[in-house]
Amino acid sequence: MNEHKLTFFIYTMGCQMNVYESEMLNMYLLNYGLLKVQNIRNANIVIVNTCSVRKHAEQKAFSYLGRLIKYKNNKIIVIGCMAEHLQLQLKKRFKNIDLIIGRNDTNNMKRTVLTIMKFLYQYKPNYIKNVYIKSSIIRYLAIAKGCNNYCSYCIVPFVRGKEVSFHYQDIFNKCTFMVQSGAREIILLGQNVNSYSNHGVTFTQLLRKIATIEKLMRIRFMTNHPKDLNDDLIHAMSVIPKICPHIHLPIQSGSDKILYKMNRKYNYEQYINLINKLRIAIPSINITTDVIVGFPNETEEDFNKTLNAIRKIKFGKVYVFKYSQRPYTSASKIHDNISYLEKQRRHKIILEESNKISLALASQMIGSTQEVLIDKLNHNSIEATTYHGYKTFITINSTHNNIHIGQIINVKIINIKGTSLFGNTILNE
Ligand code: SAH
Ligand code: SF4
Ligand code: F3S
């Protein structure tokens, strides 16, 4: 293999699954002796990890690839969900792309890295080196790939393929390895973690097993599909302290008519029942969600049902999206009859309403003491994540200099600015 070190830069779009896969790729490339650079100008190889979930995501990738033309000496590699279904278009439109690696490879990062090595060195190593790399405190880990749900709007099953649950022992070993390398919180990923099943091991059984890893302090997981969320999981969440009291449970719409058209397989009443069960079993739970506005034929009445659901349920955070018609999906056969302006209006209303609620919920934390995990130490602040929120970072004012990354401490929340919380450390409580 070439002795001089090639440099690489990875640009990641899309969901946590892509972030996870970029992390894997990053680790493998480092293991093969390539050098990671922070500045794209210094990169011999630029890898663009793409997303297809909405048209906007694809347009973003197109414009990014367009801008890359000016870095003439780079090798450009496109991976991810767009690489699967837009191979031809990408090749035609961007002559500067050197390699496109579609789904079969991106679903298996080991194969992807071997393809890249072969492309770079005309040499395919027959093994993957596993070299110790210090882990960050919070790590993602995919427990399954693909999806069998075929929600009518969604392209994911077509670009990611059928659902496959990874071997439970393999997952456990990976978690153990991550913790040995420094991880303290693991976020298990799957398009629908509740449907995980491998050699008779269910998702809840997998969680129980992972919770036995001694130095692992916190476990989270996403995404949960309401149709598959069962009592067994709710019970495990309520009794295993390491499982954070947080759940991301996409509602998508508050209207039964739209939910049916979306092929979500639950109705509003069933969703509310789940929320009630969760809140009874885990009173401190933070529930976050996804909403799509402007699905074909969504009337003002349907939309108001979604808005009322948001007001009633009080989510910690709502990720709201404008419906985007996607190829292959069954909804693509229905006329996309809500104008962009109208989608924008509905989007704004949900966003403003949900932001108000998020802020009110976060403000309730002022004065309380929260258990936080120290994630990053900056020059003049400490960033930590709370036990409850998924992405609730707290900036801590601290006079103590004995705080280290990976430590769990108590913090008294004193203030909120924007969506960020600020607090003071309490060491002996
Ligand atoms: N598997 C996960 C997430 C899939 S994509 C789940 O089932 O929840 C993340 C979110 O993007 C979805 O929850 C949905 O709200 C949104 N989304 C998916 N396809 C979309 C489309 N065609 N237009 C707009 N939003 C979409
Ligand atoms: Fe898409 Fe539905 Fe599968 Fe989620 S569960 S990835 S929204 S098809
Ligand atoms: Fe994720 Fe986007 Fe693919 S949301 S699964 S990267 S289409």
Image: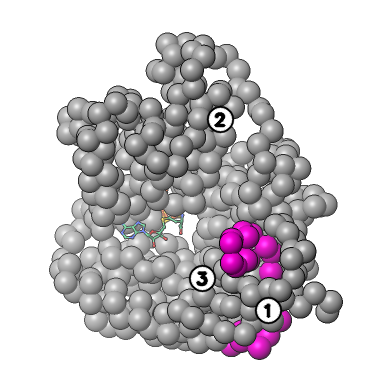
What residue is shown with label 3? 288
Residue 38 percent coordinates (x, y): 45, 42
Q: Nearer the viewer, residue 341 or 11?
A: 11
Q: Is residue 208 visible?
A: no
Q: Nearer the viewer, mark 3 or mark 1?
A: 1
Residue placed at 30% from the left, 81% from the top?
Answer: 349
Q: Amino acid at mark 3?
A: Thr
- Picture colour scheme: one colour
Disc 3 crowd rating (10 Å Cα; few below 14, some 14-19, many 20+) is: many
Which residue type carries mark 1? Asn
Q: Nearer the viewer, residue 295 or 96?
A: 96
Q: Decide: marks 3, 1 in contact (CB < 8 A)? A: no
Task: Decide if ligand 1 comes within 8 Å of the CB at mark 1.
Answer: no
Q: Which mark is residue 30?
A: 2
Q: Magenta segment, which residues?
A: 364-384
Q: Considering the numbered disc 1 on the image, is that residue within a helix, a strand or a loop?
A: strand
Q: Disc 1 marks which residue? A: 424
Which secondary structure, mark 2? helix
In the image, residue 389 lies at what x, y percent? 59, 70
Is residue 105 rendered magenta in the image?
no
Q: Whole-percent x and y of residue 341?
A: 16, 72
Quadrant occupied by the C terminus: bottom right
Q: Is residue 373 magenta?
A: yes
Looking at marks 2 and 1 on the same chain, the residue that comes earlier in the sequence is marked by 2
300 left or right of 84 in image: left
How many angstroms separate mark 3 from mark 1 (CA)?
Answer: 26 Å
Neighbours of disc 1 within 10 Å: few (<14), some (14-19), many (20+) = some
Q: Residue at x 33, y 26 (%)?
A: 75
- Answer above or below: position of 278 versus 155: below
